[in-house]
Amino acid sequence: MPEEKIVSPLKKVIRIASQKDLKNYEENKVKEKEAFKICEEKIEKYNLNMHLIDVEYKFDNSKILFYFTADGRIDFRELVKDLAAIFKTRIELRQIGVRDEVKRIGGNGVCGRELCCCSFLSDFETVSIKMAKEQNISLNPSKISGNCGRLMCCLKYEQDVYEDKLKRLPKIGSTIKTADGEGIADSIETLKEIVRVKLKDEEDNYFYKKYPVADVQVLKTAYSNESTSEEETENLEELQELEDLEIQDTKNKNQDDI
């Protein structure tokens, strides 16, 4: 692993795990399943609107972590006290977002590969509809949302490149001067930096021609680079809900420790 990707400080390596350590690890895995069942029963008892995702025993049994998802903030103080009385150790309830939930569960993406969050992605960066628009990706929720039901993290990967290239490209609808006369920018191929221009011939018939951005001149810039159909507008509303949910996930995270 390259040094710049190492998260400091590194934890100290004490020794190679012994047979006793491995046995303790396996015993903890069994106890985690039991704790999961007990916690679910207690959640039902207190009628809490939360979904238990996972349970983690610390190696030395000094603490048990319960991971859950919920639509809002949950008052689980009584639940924590109850669990502490049962397990006789420190209890931590940690609310996670749906992205974190999928990261813990695992799976494959639409690309056929293991989910990024399960293989290498350590931090979740903010993803927006604007990225999908600028990358000229279909504004269809089923195509640009991941297993977690949120906008796919991979929309962020090439965004810097698109933003850089879009600075050099005209907006759709702009008036363009070409070697064949003036026309209107009809569409763009961002990565290739090519503009398709709508032109008129001598008989006032329209035709289209592609030009490298270096070979055209913008005479009048259009106000917006967006052209949205009625169907896309309906999808945008659903996508906006996904974006709002992602923001809400961050606000909802809360935990208690006893």
Image (spheres, rainbow, N blue to C red):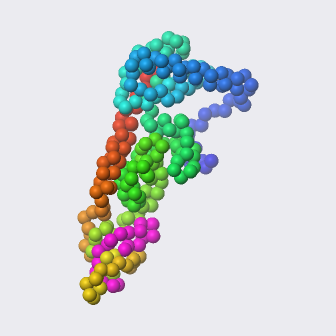
Residue name at image x 52 percent, y 12 percent = 86
On screen, residue 100 versus residue 195, left or right, reads right
Q: Is residue 153 above or below residue 222?
A: above
Q: Can residue 77 be seen by looking at this rendering?
A: no
Residue 157 location, x and y as percent? 48, 54
Q: Quadrant of residue 177?
A: bottom left
Magenta region, residue range: 179-196
Residue 255 location, x and y as percent? 43, 26
Q: Is residue 12 above or below residue 237?
A: above
Residue extending furthest front?
Answer: 231
Please identify the dominant SS of the magenta region: strand
Front-lying residue, 31 or 147: 147
Q: Is residue 187 magenta?
A: yes
On screen, residue 173 versus residue 110, left or right, reads left
Residue name at image x 46 percent, y 21 percent = 257
Front-lying residue, 203 or 86: 203
Q: Is residue 142 magenta?
A: no
Residue 28 location, x and y as percent? 62, 22
Residue name at image x 43 percent, y 19 percent = 44
